[in-house]
Image: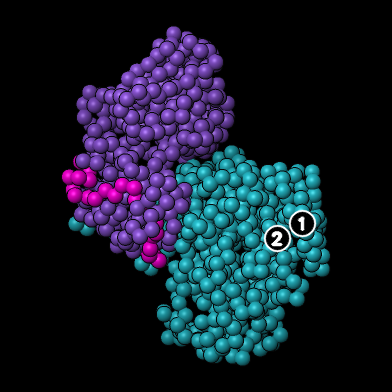
Chain colours: A cyan, B purple
Amino acid sequence: MKKLYDIVIIGAGIAGSAIARELSRYDLKIALLEKEADAAFGVSKANSGIVHAGFHSAPGMVKSRLCVRGNYLYGELKDELDLPFERKGELMIARGAEDEEKLEFFLKQGNQLGVPDLKIVRGEELRRLEPQLSDEITAALYAPSAGVINPYETVYRFVQNAMQNGVEFFPDSEVVAVAEGIVETTEQTFETKYIINAAGLNAAKIAEMAGLHTFDIKPRKGQEYLLDRKASALVNHVIFPLPSKTSKGILVIPTLDGTVMIGPSAEDGRDDDTTTNDVFDAILASTRTIIPSITPKLLISAFAGVRPVATGDDFIIGPTGVKGFINVAGIQSPGLTAAPAIAEAVVAILKKNGDLLLNKKSDFIAYVPRHPKARTMGKEDLSRSVALDPHFGKLVCRCEHVSEAEIRQAVREGASTLDGIKLRTRAGMGRCQGGFCTYRILEIMAEELGVPMTELTKKGANSALLAKDLKNDR
Amino acid sequence: MTDKPVVIVGGGPAGLIAATAAAEQGANVILVDREKHAGGILNQCIHTGFGLAFYKEELTGPEFAERAAASALVKGVKFMNETSVLSVSGKTVSVINEHGVSDIDAGAVVLCTGCRERPRGALHIPGTRPAGVYTAGLAQKLVNIAGFLPGKRIVILGSGDIGLIMARRLTLEGAEVLAVVEVMPAPGGLRRNIVQCLDDFGIPLYLSHTVTDIRGKNRVEGVTIAKVDEKFNPVEGTSFDLDCDTLLLSVGLIPENEIAETAGAEIDPASNGMLVDENLMTTVDGVFGCGNALHVHNLVDDLAVEAAQAGKNAALYAAGHVFAPCTIPVVNDGAFGNVVPARVSGTQPAVIRFRVRRPQKGAAVSVGTFSKRFAHLQPNTMESVTVPADAFTDKKEAVLCLNNTL
């Protein structure tokens, strides 16, 4: 049976989910499709979680304008979507006079783009901001508007709020065919007025299904390494070297969760999630030229992600030769930052086309339910939360202080896999990496979802966690 | 004299025995444990081999735990189960459970927080991130407590005791254990476990080998194994693949001291264990530590002796006893992987526990004027010497020396 929609969004990563949420303000019938078992399981899963200030790219590029606007919009979204977001500020560092000239260039570029409060800091002022910085670093471009955010939670909150406002979400739905007004998945066929191609690494493939051969997506892999909370005492800001042609370089990122991330690498043509020793050594060496007190002993986890790099290295956002087919492709860095502005851009395109009635809903819900976290609550708030729900009194993940209440809320909000729980709550992301809590989480999931333990997976199809039930399955 | 309670943090064997020992001194003892049932990791160690020295009887892990818990109960220890410690500040212990958050004003605290398994990330094994990579202890919990087989074709990295025990356990439950891979030239676990868990089942042990790659997008599909050189780097041309659906990691245990850190107790950066004096007091006055949170023990029976000492001393402290100041640092001459305690007083006999870095035959271990000869010393086995007070002739430092004249 065919279903009739106004808009079908392909891809529930940061771009697709932000678009879904923005469009859910209007009286439209919208479907959000995701080929994986959960939102944020593609490119967004390995995002570094930086809300960039926006001085990095040239004023002529699409992504420059959207980055600065997106940064501003997160200020509003933080409250509406209960987002973990903090403006910790960015520092782009220089070693000596030659580098410092380049800082001047980025300062000028940033000012031109409207990045607020940029300035170059030196000497004691710089050491005050970042006391552990290498002695070789002479100056830095300081952008206080930059911040860090939890990228997965951001995707989940966009999806959650979109669904509160009527958007239908279809996980495990890989698109197999696209034509004007038609999207066919492995599960069903959607008839729709508009198709928004936010398919990340597969955006070129989706466009080709529609008969469009205007761009290509090349993968650019990045490996990232997560350091213990102990490292958080060593770094206060997101720290960049001067950028290269293909990347912003190896960064030192104090995450919101108190850990420190170092990376990413930029490996063109690679689309796998393997991590390798040579790249780790290079990332560590580069990091130690910035913060020498970071040691390999602090390492707790490694992961890799893939950036979808479009032909021309810019975002590709706009209508196409196929009626109703809009591309939102090549959303690599600063895609997370730009996402809310990308969503506005899509609305602008629809308005310009004029063939879809864009009536704002009077009953739009701007706020998601709150997501209280045992980890960040003071004793009094925690006591109050326990009084309301005793599950707050049981810490399931001891390393990250995640309560049973948070795990249950995550399942009720759509987490269907162990990775889905981990990305939503941080359970299993700490020092023991799930050694202690995995079993309890599986028990809670089985209970909440009403399925046997052997059906639970790490990340969807073919990733079952348990091979056999020894009690009932002899 | 104070009636403030001695608070024991952790309900594993160290916690239970420390609690019992404190109660035997007449202290009011509260034991805080996150689990529903006391006993800690012993509850999933359903094999025998526990208690020979401490209870003069061979017991399974759960049996040992049950006895230790029963003794604690009989001595009047109050249990706070399903309760997590949020932090320790001074001697105030903040706890959370279903009833809310509360602060316990303690007369003394004993941290018995055990250890955790080193995870994949800390090892930095390259490869994909599929389902089917588990630490050996988690696999043990899945099989022995939950009743689930984590996989059917299994490779184990690391020859720690839990990994060896799990090789046998999984084989008995119908899984196929293809190999145990150890990066060091000698196994990490006890000799008896190599024989009883691997040799008896024909499971190959690859020494000086490591896993260099993990394959599989969704579930583990295979691993690559290679020989390593003296610097633990893979040797080219020696790699081979094994098709498996599970990789278990048994690559070391790390003392779990996040709560000790909230208390401000000094941690040994090398071992991650708390730095304690001869009375097992940490660098925070009135806060004691023992068990695997201090240093990872081979046998629960050895750990029990240490835990009983910590519990007793905590009770004495809470009752107003003042210990002789421990001003003599114990210094490792470099031959030892780990030495406990970090400071002694020189006024009473001190038990010094250690592990050697390399295997030794007929070596003597000396401190001051004291010396003891050992027929064998192995890195995988913790040993101890009891040094009499008058042996600490140097009041500036007590150097633990290894003398091997053979």
Subunit that carries the residue with mark 1: A
Lateral position of residue B194 relative to residue A225, left or right: left
Residue plotted at (35% across, 55% down): B226
Secondary structure found at label 2: loop
Residue plotted at (34% across, 53% down): B227
Q: Which amino acid is tagged 1?
A: Leu
Residue occupied by mark 1? A141
Q: Is residue B286 above or below residue A218?
A: above
Q: Is residue B268 visible?
A: yes
Secondary structure found at label 1: strand
Q: Quadrant of residue A180?
A: bottom right
Is B216 one of the magenta-colored residues? yes
Q: Is residue B109 above or below residue A305?
A: above
Q: Quadrant of the C terminus of chain B?
A: top left
- Which of marks 2 and 1 precedes in the sequence? 1
Q: Is residue A44 above or below residue B22?
A: below
Is A432 one of the magenta-colored residues? no
Q: Quadrant of residue B67?
A: top left
Q: Is residue A255 visible?
A: no
Residue furthest toward the left?
A: B200
Category of crowding for the residue at label 2, using alpha-carbon neighbours closer than 10 angstroms: few (below 14), some (14–19), many (at least 20): many
Subunit that carries the residue with mark 2: A
Query: What range is drawn magenta here?
Result: B196-219
Q: Which amino acid is tagged 2?
A: Leu
Relative to the observer, which residue lies in front, A163 or B66?
B66
> How far apart, in angstroms, are the residues tagged by discs 1 and 2?
10 Å
Disc assigned to residue A242? 2
Residue plotted at (18% across, 48% down): B201
